[in-house]
Image (tube, rainbow, N blue to C red):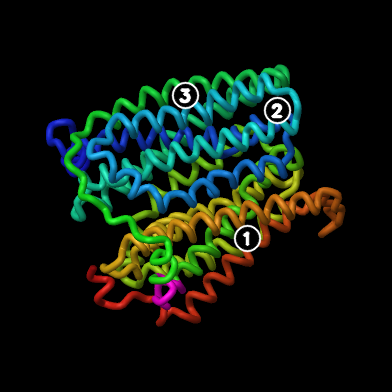
Amino acid sequence: MIKFRTVFNFHDPDARGRTCALIFKVVEGFLVYINSGVFYTDFLRCYGMDSVEAGILTFIPYIAGMFVIFMPSLLNHFPKRRWILATCKILYYFCILCGMNLLAEFVKDDAGRLWGMILITFFASLFNIIATSGYAAWHIRFQPEEVRAYFLSTCLLCTSTVAGVLSLLGGWLGDYFESVDSAKLLTFLVVLRYCTFGLCVANVIFLLLPREVEYPTIRAPRFADIISIPLKNRKFMLTMLVVFLWQFSCYCYATQLNYYARDVIGMSLTYINLVILLYSVIFFLTTKFWQKMINKTSWFFVFAIALLIVAPFQIMYGFVTPLNYVWFVMIVRLPQHFAGVGHNTAFDNLQYINMPVTNRECYAAFYQIVFNLGALAGHGFGAWFDGMTKSWSYTVFGQTYTSGIPFLVMLCGVVQIVIAVFIFAFRKQLEPDKSVEAA
């Protein structure tokens, strides 16, 4: 508690900046649950969109994310960015929450509604990229190396806990309204999105409070250098292959699974959000264990070991049915939560491990390209595979399946095994040089 009060308070200027960032991240975490998880897919389901259309919508932000490489040169034109960044953030919230609500309500044509949502999502994502890039450069000044690890772990714990509890409450309310009248679920989700917009706009106030100092001018790298310089660094490129495969495995089934859980398995919103909330509990109990393991071994070793723990349970996840999900999902997800703390912690640092001190702008931009391409490939493949297997019907262990989505879930587990084997096979080439590690 003493350390918390030292890192987070409103007396010291830097601590005030960290406190404001923490509050903002907690509220932003709730928005992520509302606009990318089961609440979002239920919102789309209520307007008649299937899992393929939802899959298309969810990879649009990653197309917009490719423009992140142009943000440094754009932001260089603004020595003071406080109000510009706040405006972009509010525009993002308005488009993604209110804009989507209004479009879905007034555009009745299914094709027109889908294309309208695609455009809104794309431009909202552009606003968010500008704001996120600017805040990253601004708030990093309040996070010196000696407190950064504690700051990030505290943000992650608080965000997942508070957002998880709020989402669990929202899920219970959603289930209640759905049990009364299925049409009331849509009304609840629309009102929830408007309330979230009001909360997020108020939350922007905390982004305006930290002191803003003069920004250093960042030399925007040429696009040719962004591609050519990292390609010459074998160690970095091997790391980027791991990043790409991981992103692909995470997103190849993400949207489709929410539809499958709700429409086929019959999971309630409360149950889904309860399972998600348990991650916060396990994170709190096991984070020190994983940090000690990282210190004793390496980031890559922990990432690979965690994936080998996760992968078998991921493959088992494909055999969840309406008859066994209440107990079987817990058997699958709790070990995944435990290992997830390890691989999430390790993955967050992968972009820095083999990044040389020189030309860091090029390497950072290349990482963003690979990060978004991996997610884009995963979403794209998932939407394509889901569309191709809508009419599938097959029986395994006496259970009849009418969708290819379980195969997507199991494919993720196979890719996770491939990543782990790859890391162990090329560990000497992947582990950082002492000079890079020291940097």
Q: Earlier in the sequence, mark 1 or mark 2?
A: 2
Instruction: Tell me if residue 236 is in the magenta stretch.
Output: yes
Q: Nearer the viewer, residue 292 or 30?
A: 30
Secondary structure mostly seen in magenta is helix
- In the image, which residues are magenta? 230-238
Labels 1, 2: front one:
2
Q: Residue at (67%, 40%) from the top-left corner?
A: 54
Query: In the image, what residue occupies the spot 52% across and 20% down?
Result: 194
- Mark 1 burial class by Cα count in 10 Å: few <14, some 14-19, many 20+: many
In the picture provided, is 295 more to the left or to the right than 278? left
Residue located beneath label 3 in the image: 197
Quadrant (top left, top right, bottom left, bottom right) of the C terminus: bottom left
As drawn, the label of residue 412 is 1
**Mark 3: which amino acid?**
Phe
Q: Does the magenta-highlighted stretch encompass residue 81?
A: no
The local secondary structure at tag 1 comes to helix
Q: Real-space Cα distance between discs 3 and 1?
A: 34 Å
Q: CA distance from mark 1 to mark 2?
A: 28 Å
